[in-house]
Amino acid sequence: MNSNALLLRALRGPLTLILVGTLFVIDHNAVISFTKTWPIIIIFLGAIRLAERAVMEDTPPAPPYSQGGAR
């Protein structure tokens, strides 16, 4: 894994907490209900996951598993 993928993985948790906190503040101030904004969390997590995959290095697939003797 390269450093960009590790950085995104390290930031995923803190950014998610900031997002959830922001959504609760918006709900508390009666701007928009949390029941209408919670899908943003799923969209955010999906976008972060896509970004992680985009910056990951391509690794060759593992060789197929052989169960024994030659034929």
Image: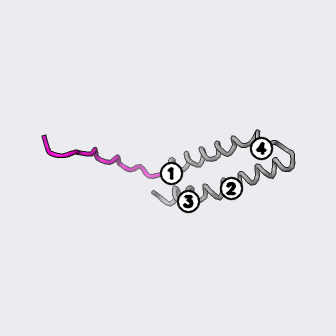
Kind of residue at disc 4: Phe
Q: Mostly what secondary structure, the magenta segment?
A: loop
Q: Which residue is mark 2?
A: 17
Kind of residue at disc 3: Leu
At 44% from the left edge and 52% from the top edge, which residue is drawn?
57
Q: In the rendered view, does 66 fall on the left or right side of 44?
A: left
Circle 3 sits in a helix, a strand or a loop, which is it?
A: helix
Quarter containing the C terminus: top left
Task: Tell me the CA gap for discs 4 and 1.
Answer: 32 Å
Q: Can you give x and y, in whole percent of width and height, for residue 19 in the image?
A: 71, 52
At 81% from the left edge and 52% from the top edge, which residue is drawn?
25
Q: In the rendered view, does 46 fall on the left or right side of 25?
A: left
Q: Nearer the viewer, residue 10 or 60?
A: 10
Q: Can you give x and y, in whole percent of width and height, for residue 5 in the image?
A: 52, 55
Give the residues drawn in magenta, as a range. 54-71
Q: Which residue is mark 1?
A: 55
At 61% from the left edge and 47% from the top edge, which residue is drawn?
45
Q: Nearer the viewer, mark 3 or mark 2?
A: 2
Task: Tell me the CA gap for discs 3 and 1.
Answer: 10 Å
Q: Are marks 3 and 1 in contact (CB under 8 Å)?
A: no
Q: Earlier in the sequence, mark 1 or mark 2?
A: 2
Q: Nearer the viewer, mark 1 or mark 2?
A: 2
Q: Which residue is mark 4?
A: 34
Q: In the rendered view, does 67 fall on the left or right side of 24?
A: left
Q: Which mark is residue 7?
A: 3
